[in-house]
């Protein structure tokens, strides 16, 4: 009596496992001081972290300066990276903390801007208006973002602008997923109120 045999294939790592292994290998190369390894890490993540810093600070020059600080901190703290989270998530968490520290110190020195929305016109549907009007609307949104409380702004930027899921936002900011949802909701309400002044 013939018995059918199931062919067992060795498990092949999927794309996620392969990416994680490559990240860990890159981190290990950085730790060993291998020439070009940290530059490779920088090139892979600098664009996204610069975008994050720009949106949270509202100033490309400050963002550029802070990006250097973020990667200096990453270089110093690479030994603490254990691979429990993706390297990008670890860097996001580190970058967010650096940015929030910078915002806190800047706010302590200069105070929060409270009337920056009174100079330009916000348009509800930028698709129907001229390019110049869209630029004004974007500037107004950036100014409104700058007025949000730190926690709301960070959660809003990470979720609504950068496209992270709430669980990822929670992981990056070290908060509960429910807190992320609440912060994003509050940020949206506050932004609507700020931008409504333009009408």
Image (cartoon, rainbow, N blue to C red):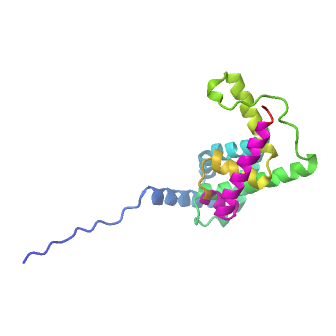
**Relative depth, front residue between 140 and 40:** 140
Q: In this view, does 164 lie to the left or right of 186?
A: left
> Does 91 appear in magenta?
no
Residue 101 image offset from top left, x and y in percent:
81, 55
**Relative depth, front residue between 179 and 25:** 179
| Overall secondary structure of the magenta section | helix
Q: What residue is shown at x 76% (from left), y 37% (from top)? A: 195
Question: Most extreme residue toward the front, as rendered?
Answer: 199
Q: What residue is shown at x 64% (from left), y 50% (from top)? A: 159
Residue 106 image offset from top left, x and y in percent:
87, 48
Query: Does residue 110 show up?
Result: yes
Residue 46 image offset from top left, x and y in percent:
65, 45
Q: What residue is shown at x 88% (from left), y 46% (from top)? A: 112
**Relative depth, front residue between 122 and 10:** 122
Task: Tell me: residue 127, above or below residue 166.
Answer: above
> Does 190 appear in magenta?
yes
Q: What residue is shown at x 82% (from left), y 51% (from top)? A: 102
Q: Quadrant of the N terminus?
A: bottom left
Task: Tell me: residue 172, above or below residue 4.
Answer: above
Q: In this view, does 8 lie to the left or right of 70?
A: left
Task: Tell me: residue 36, above or below residue 21.
Answer: above
Please tell me in which quadrant of the rendered image residue 57 appears. Answer: top right
Which span is picked out in magenta? Answer: 167-196
Residue 79 image offset from top left, x and y in percent:
66, 65
Q: Quadrant of the C terminus?
A: top right
Question: Most extreme residue toward the left, as rendered?
Answer: 1
Query: Does residue 33 show up?
Result: no
């Amino acid at each position: 009596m013939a018995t059918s045999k199931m062919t067992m294939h060795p498990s092949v790592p999927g794309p996620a496992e392969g990416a994680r292994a490559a990240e860990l290998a890159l981190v290990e190369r950085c730790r060993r001081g291998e020439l070009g390894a940290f530059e490779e890490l920088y090139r892979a993540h600098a664009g996204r972290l610069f975008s994050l810093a720009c949106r949270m600070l509202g100033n490309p020059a400050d963002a550029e300066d802070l990006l250097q600080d973020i990667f200096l901190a990453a270089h110093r703290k690479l030994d603490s990276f254990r691979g429990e989270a993706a390297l990008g998530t670890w860097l996001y968490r580190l970058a967010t903390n650096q940015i929030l520290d910078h915002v806190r110190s800047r706010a302590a020195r200069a105070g929060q801007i409270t009337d920056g929305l009174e100079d330009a016109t916000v348009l509800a549907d930028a698709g129907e208006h001229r390019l110049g009007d869209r630029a004004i609307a974007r500037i107004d949104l950036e100014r409104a973002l700058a007025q949000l409380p730190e926690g709301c702004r960070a959660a809003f930027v990470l979720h609504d602008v950068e496209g992270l899921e709430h669980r990822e936002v929670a992981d990056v900011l070290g908060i509960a997923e429910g807190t992320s949802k609440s912060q994003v909701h509050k940020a949206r309400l506050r932004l609507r109120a700020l931008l409504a002044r333009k009408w």
